[in-house]
Amino acid sequence: MMKEKPSSVRKGVAAIIFRRRNGVPEFLVMHRVLRWKGWEPLKGGVNSGESERTALSREINEEIDVRGGDVRVIGIIPNAKIALRVPLRFRKQMGGFSSALYKPFYLVEIALKAKPDLRKDGAREHDEIMFVPYDMALGMLTYPNARAALRKSMRMLL
């Protein structure tokens, strides 16, 4: 019997997170500083034995310190994903994975009363988060696949 080779793809989830202020959606953008610099939506890995929804809840709690009662998953953004090759110099930090696939991509609403804040954990992936209007978020997001997910999420909200 052949031993199965472990996957070289890190499985993850991503989310376009928004809140409504006076009925108008504002979108969360996160300024990444670990391994690259730029603006991104929330994303994170799925741990072994963890469901995608559980990973999503954990990442929201870990990254922006918001818990279940203030979170509502609207749905999955169709045909949205973040797929990337992990540069050789970062593979050890990324658990040896050569690529990462963040899919599904969720649309998530958080309550206006929630106070998202960067968690001061050991990863220090981000140095800033903010809620901004749609057009501003579209201009800030660094990568085209994140902007495409934002566009699709806006269509879901209309």
Image (tube, helix red, strand yellow):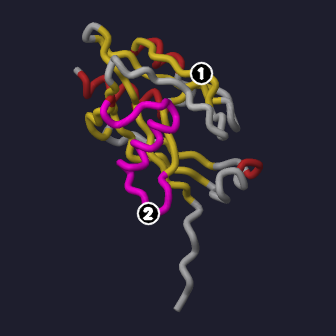
Is residue 15 shown above or below 89? Answer: above
Question: Is there CB contact under 8 Å for labels 1 and 2?
Answer: no
Amino acid type of the residue that numbered disc 1 sits on in the rendered structure? Glu
Determine crowd level at label 2: few under 14, some 14-19, many 20+ residues with C-alpha closer than 10 A: few
Q: Residue furthest right?
A: 89
Foreground of the two, 15 or 122: 122
| Residue ID at (62%, 37%) | 121
The residue at which mark 2 appears reads as 49
Q: Quadrant of residue 158?
A: top left
Q: Majority secondary structure of the magenta segment?
A: helix
Coordinates of residue 27 in the picture (x, y in percent): 41, 20
Amino acid type of the residue that numbered disc 2 sits on in the rendered structure? Gly
Q: Earlier in the sequence, mark 1 or mark 2?
A: 2
**On the rendered structure, is 19 left or right of 93?**
left
Q: Residue furthest top?
A: 22
Coordinates of residue 136 in the picture (x, y in percent): 47, 12
Q: Quadrant of residue 155?
A: top left
Is residue 84 shown above or below 119? Answer: below
| Residue ID at (63%, 34%) | 125
Measure the alpha-carbon separation of dots 1 and 2.
31 Å
Foreground of the two, 26 or 58: 58
Determine crowd level at label 1: few under 14, some 14-19, many 20+ residues with C-alpha closer than 10 A: few
The residue at which mark 1 appears reads as 128
Element assignment for label 2: loop
Give the residues drawn in magenta, as a range.
Answer: 46-69
Coordinates of residue 64 in the picture (x, y in percent): 49, 30
